[in-house]
Image: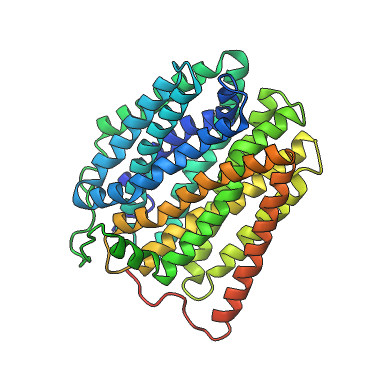
């Protein structure tokens, strides 16, 4: 077992920092970059959707592969693929090439995140698993604060293309650090001492995993929160800020940057609460997450003050952080008969499905009605989820019935 101070764990956090620094740099500008090649909101929305639909098809295969080989090989391969996709994006000439490079970066991020989540789940005890996953997510996603601010600033001074080139160099630099420091060599594979069900990859086997109560709840939760995070924040908010609020690129970058701070805070708090409340009381995390996200989204269109918009974006980040840090901990803590990498990939299909569907739906709402309508749709869904988890909490907590019946 590893500790939070172990060399390998710190190394994974640093690699996550590098990958997400680059990703954060392009987070507020990708949809704006797409506008240089098309005026169609549908195609702009598709640049976000293709990233997620590609990941859907690679989550389980890469998770399965990470169970069969060294996780460190999958982690480092993911960084390289992501860096290559960034470099190619800097030289595209049409919107369809952008779609292709966004699909390629999706493969790289799947490899990195599935393998790192499985690695941490393997090597930490059940008492510290939530905290370890939460801190890792906090390091990765709070980095968007730095990256988004830097990306908006660099795009304003130079060009969108320059930001992607710099992002590629950042990832290659952290890759070189990881290889030269020889981290993850000793503990690169999953713990083979455990008894695992052999995952065949069949639809029946996949359905069996998905219908496990804990995986079903985790899958629904991450799907729902993606409507806010990937649909609203990634695609609609930058367009709303530019077209409706007439904000400059640097201002958009600052507004988007606070999401990373929020995710970091939410991830750490969510992980700590999970370790204390699992299994009976952990649904409180999701009640808090959706209530905070719903309130922040509800208030977003009521102001044009930069500080308030940044604060509200930070609150949506806290909402996402609560969910994203605790759902993998829930899955890893409740599944005893499947290899962790495979199950992580299965759960993450719904993470990607939400990321794929939400930009398309919200862009369609924006084109059919106006740019504010997607905010109405999003907070309505978040508030419905809040009431749903309140109901689930009262079903289980008063009777002291654990939601999970097995522990890894």
374 and 398: which one is in front? 374
Q: Position of residue 130 (x, y in %)?
A: 44, 60
Q: Residue furthest front?
A: 368
Quadrant in which the N terminus is drawn: bottom left
Quadrant in which the C terminus is drawn: bottom left
- At 42% from the left and 74% from the top, the residue drawn is 404
| Residue 265 visible | no
Image-based side of 36 in relation to 299, left or right: left
- At 61% from the left and 21% from the top, the residue drawn is 153
| Residue 374 visible | yes
Q: Position of residue 294 (x, y in %)?
A: 69, 55
91 and 128: which one is in front? 91
Q: Position of residue 139 (x, y in %)?
A: 48, 43
- At 30% from the left and 27% from the top, the residue drawn is 176
Q: Quarter of the image holding residue 369?
A: top right
Q: Is residue 333 above or below residue 52?
A: below
Q: Is residue 98 above or below residue 159?
A: below
Q: Residue furthest bottom?
A: 399
């Amino acid at each position: 077992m590893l500790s939070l101070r172990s060399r390998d764990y710190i190394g994974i956090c640093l690699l996550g920092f590098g990958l997400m620094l680059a990703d954060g740099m392009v987070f507020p500008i990708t949809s704006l970059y797409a506008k240089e090649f098309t005026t169609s909101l549908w195609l702009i929305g598709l640049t976000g959707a293709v990233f997620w639909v590609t990941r859907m098809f690679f989550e389980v295969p890469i998770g399965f592969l990470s169970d069969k080989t060294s996780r460190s090989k999958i982690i480092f391969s993911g960084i390289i693929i992501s860096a290559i996709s960034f470099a190619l994006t800097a030289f595209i000439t049409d919107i369809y090439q952008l779609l292709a490079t966004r699909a390629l970066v999706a493969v790289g991020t799947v490899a990195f995140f599935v393998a790192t989540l499985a690695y941490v789940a393997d090597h930490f005890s059940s008492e510290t698993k939530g905290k370890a996953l939460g801190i890792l997510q906090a390091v990765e996603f709070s980095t968007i604060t730095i990256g988004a601010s830097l990306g908006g600033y660099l795009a304003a001074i130079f060009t969108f293309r320059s930001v992607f080139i710099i992002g590629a160099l950042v990832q290659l630099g952290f890759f070189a650090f990881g290889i030269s420091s020889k981290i993850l060599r000793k503990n690169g594979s999953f713990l083979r001492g455990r008894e695992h069900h052999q995952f065949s990859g069949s639809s029946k086997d996949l359905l069996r995993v998905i219908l496990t109560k804990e995986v079903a709840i985790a899958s629904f939760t991450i799907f729902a929160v993606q409507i806010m995070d990937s649909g609203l924040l990634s695609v609609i908010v930058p367009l709303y800020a530019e077209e409706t609020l007439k904000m400059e690129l640097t201002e958009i970058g600052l507004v988007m940057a606070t999401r990373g701070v929020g995710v970091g805070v939410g991830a750490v708090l969510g992980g700590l609460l999970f370790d204390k409340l699992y299994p009976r009381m952990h649904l409180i995390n999701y009640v808090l997450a959706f209530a905070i996200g719903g309130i922040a989204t509800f208030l977003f269109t009521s102001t044009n003050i930069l500080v308030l918009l940044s604060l509200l974006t930070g609150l949506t980040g806290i909402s996402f952080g609560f969910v994203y840090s605790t759902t993998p901990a829930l899955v890893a803590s409740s599944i005893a008969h499947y290899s962790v990498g495979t199950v992580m990939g299965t759960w993450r299909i719904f993470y990607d499905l939400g990321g794929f569907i939400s930009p398309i739906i919200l862009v369609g709402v924006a084109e059919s009605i106006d740019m504010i309508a997607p905010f109405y749709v999003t907070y309505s869904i978040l508030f419905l989820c809040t009431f749903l988890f309140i109901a689930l909490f009262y079903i289980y907590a008063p009777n002291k019935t654990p939601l999970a019946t097995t522990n890894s």
